[in-house]
Image (tube, helix red, strand yellow):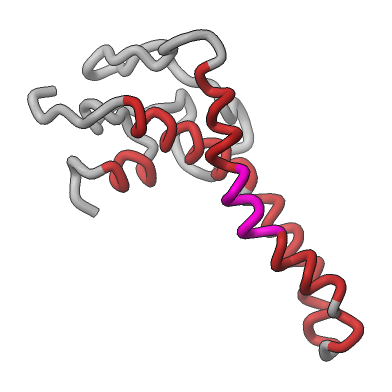
């Protein structure tokens, strides 16, 4: 991934303007404490992350299609388990647990996508 691209900022959870500062107080995709806690400003370039009240509510609209892409095939697979071999009946609960564990990274990535839609990269920072 090349620095300066939106993909870099989203997947690394970095500030969209400078791509150096972290978006979250507890960095990383898989965290289990302070999941959505963000600083008010980027520690490096001082970009404001609290753009307006209720700004991150729009992240729900970003994560919704991604959730559909993950869960609809799982629901279809669950209804067709009677016709599938025993291996899938055993592995299906693990697939469900894995998809539930992906909810935390999905919430974080949705916020990063929303910020990257709003804020552009600036190389001078």
Q: Residue at x 50, y 18 (%)?
A: 55
Magenta segment includes 69: yes
- The percent position of residue 23, horizontal first and vertical second, equals 40, 27
Q: Main secondary structure of the magenta part?
A: helix
| Residue ranking furthest to the right | 82
The C terminus lies in quadrant? top left
Judged left or right of residue 80, residue 56 is left
Judged left or right of residue 30, residue 67 is right
Judged left or right of residue 104, residue 96 is right
- The percent position of residue 73, horizontal first and vertical second, equals 70, 67
**In this picture, is 60 found above or below 73?**
above
The N terminus lies in quadrant? bottom left
**In this picture, is 84 found above or below 97?**
below
Residue interval drawn in magenta: 64-71
Among the 4 quarters of the image, the one containing residue 119: top left
- The percent position of residue 76, horizontal first and vertical second, equals 78, 70
Q: Residue at x 39, y 16 (%)?
A: 49
* Number of numbered markers: 0
Q: Residue at x 79, y 86 (%)?
A: 87
Magenta segment includes 94: no
Q: Nearer the viewer, residue 36 or 77?
A: 77
- The percent position of residue 104, horizontal first and vertical second, equals 61, 41
Q: Residue at x 59, y 49 (%)?
A: 65
**In this picture, is 86 found above or below 105?**
below
């Amino acid at each position: 991934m090349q620095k300066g691209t939106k993909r870099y900022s989203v997947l690394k959870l970095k500030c969209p303007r400078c791509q150096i500062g972290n978006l979250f107080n507890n960095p990383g995709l898989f965290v289990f404490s302070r999941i959505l806690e963000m600083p008010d400003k980027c520690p490096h370039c001082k970009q404001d992350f609290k753009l307006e009240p209720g700004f991150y509510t729009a992240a729900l609209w970003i994560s919704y299609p991604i959730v559909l892409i993950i869960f609809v095939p799982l629901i279809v697979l669950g209804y067709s388990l009677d016709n599938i071999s025993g291996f899938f009946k055993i592995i299906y609960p693990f697939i469900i647990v894995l998809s539930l564990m992906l909810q935390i990274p999905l919430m974080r990535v949705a916020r990063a996508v929303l910020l990257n839609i709003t804020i552009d990269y600036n190389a001078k920072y």
